[in-house]
Amino acid sequence: MLAVAVLAAGKGTRMKSDLPKVLQPLAGSTLVERVLQSCEQLSPERRLLIVGHQAERVEQSLAAHGGLEFVLQAPQNGTGHAVQQLLEPLAGFQGDLLVLNGDVPLLREQTIHDLLERHRRSGAAVTLLTARLADPTGYGRVFADAEGRVSGIVEHRDCSEAQRRNDLINAGIYCFSWPALARVLPELRSDNDQGELYLTDTVAMLQPAMHVEVADAEEISGINDRIQLAECEAVIQDRLRRHWMCEGVTFVDPASCTLSDGTRFGRDVVVEPQCHFRGETVIGDGCRIGPGCLIENSTLAENVEVLHSVLRDVTVERGCTVGPFAQLRAGAHLGAEVRIGNFVEVKNSRLAAGVKANHLTYLGDADLGAGVNVGAGTITANYDGVRKHRTVIGAGSKTGANCTLVAPITVGEQVTIGAGSTLTRDVPSGSLALGRARQLVKENWPGPR
Ligand code: UD1
Ligand code: CA
């Protein structure tokens, strides 16, 4: 039997943020989501989250995650006090309790799995994860013998000079036999520099206490300030890029690109420098992205090329080219082989296969049939100051340069619209539409006097 408890009640004072620390984002997921993910495969019987500072906000952010038990810690009087809150919800529980600090987001599932294995094999009352750090400043120091038996943990601020030289640190990840921990929890005292109840003090009260040193100390980095947040972001970005390179994606300049957990790539995608992928984004086989793109919550089918453009909440079918300097906004749907050129903005519009809008255009709330050619400078005037209206253009039609289509308006199929027209009325299929002043020419004009 396994229960997992994540400590997420602290304020995160050193972040200097209005956001609770565990809700700080890393590659599109919050800190606490990452910590929860790292123990998902263990399929624990119980998952408890200790919340306190801005508890409601933390709970709301995890509303989509089923099976979580929220346990309130108020006020927040230290990590030992946090775990004391479990005495009631876990009364009578006979299994192991895995405790994870909510601010340690780089842990690999395998590492937690190994910790649990070791704990169960050795029969220890507690097994904790440790690391040797070149700079152990700020972490609790673990005192252990050569056999891995731990005598105690002393927080950095409570250490003597000599104790500080010990570079074996507490990662904040523990596997306890819950009945043993439950017996000693009420005995914790707050006679330390912070006047708090420390979970780490239970280790000296529990025998045997063992530790497991992680191979890769990077994994146990805790986040207390924005410098550590940025360092962890860099590690996660590196992991994501390496993963996708192994899956057949070329990054020309990997370090200049960022990904989210929800980004997926097909094979033979080439990502040029300075590209950023956010949210749930899918990039199909053979796409060429960049340089200089931001793509968020979007789906691109095969062989799409995007250059220096911003795409958010859009769908792009196969073989399209976008950019340079285009913006595709929420609800843009490009059919196959659509061409979107420089300084073109598309919002909430469906462009059927083969549409071309190559220069200086705004298409908002529009439906364009197959093969429509949008002349340079065409604008759909979709907003009357109160409401948005739709523009419909039938297959095979052409708008001339510098046209304004005042919505609501329906233009039929195979229509030709003269350059410089402002159209306010529907146009039937097969016609020529002109909506501009006749040209006036006065010969031999003397010029201003
Ligand atoms: C803690 C450990 C330290 C270890 C380090 C690893 C203690 C006393 N110290 O120190 O030995 O090296 O983690 O990163 O445990 N929290 C609560 N309620 C509270 C206080 C904290 O839920 O009352 C939560 C925080 O939200 C956070 C976690 O516990 O997720 C750790 O708290 P933090 O204050 O960051 O502990 P450290 O000083 O880093
Ligand atoms: Ca911490």
Image (spheres, helix red, strand yellow):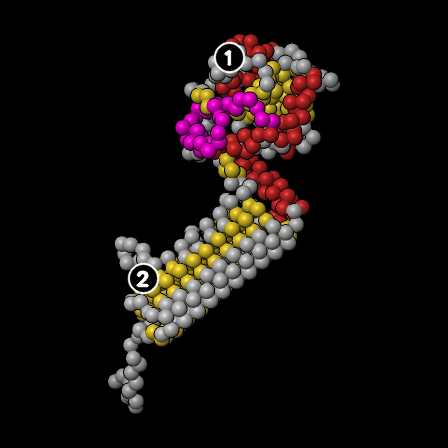
Q: Amino acid at mark 2?
A: Ala
Q: Amino acid at mark 1?
A: Ala
Residue 166 in the image, given as x and y percentages of width and height? 67, 22
Which label is found at residue 395?
none
Residue beneath label 1, please? 91
Report the residue at 67% width, 46% height from top: 246
Quarter of the rendering occupied by the C terminus: bottom left
Residue 276's place in the image compared with 16, above or below, is: below
Helix, strand or loop at label 1? It is loop
Residue beneath label 2, please? 407
Q: Is residue 63 visible?
A: yes
Residue 295 in the image, given as x and y percentages of width and height? 51, 51
Q: Nearer the viewer, residue 357 or 144?
A: 357
Q: Is residue 343 visible?
A: no
**CA–CA distance in space, label 2 to label 1:** 66 Å
Dot 1 alpha-carbon crowd within 10 angstroms: few under 14, some 14 to 19, many 20 or more: few
- So how many labels did they put on this image? 2
Report the residue at 34% width, 70% height from top: 428
Tell me which segment is drawn in magenta: 42-69
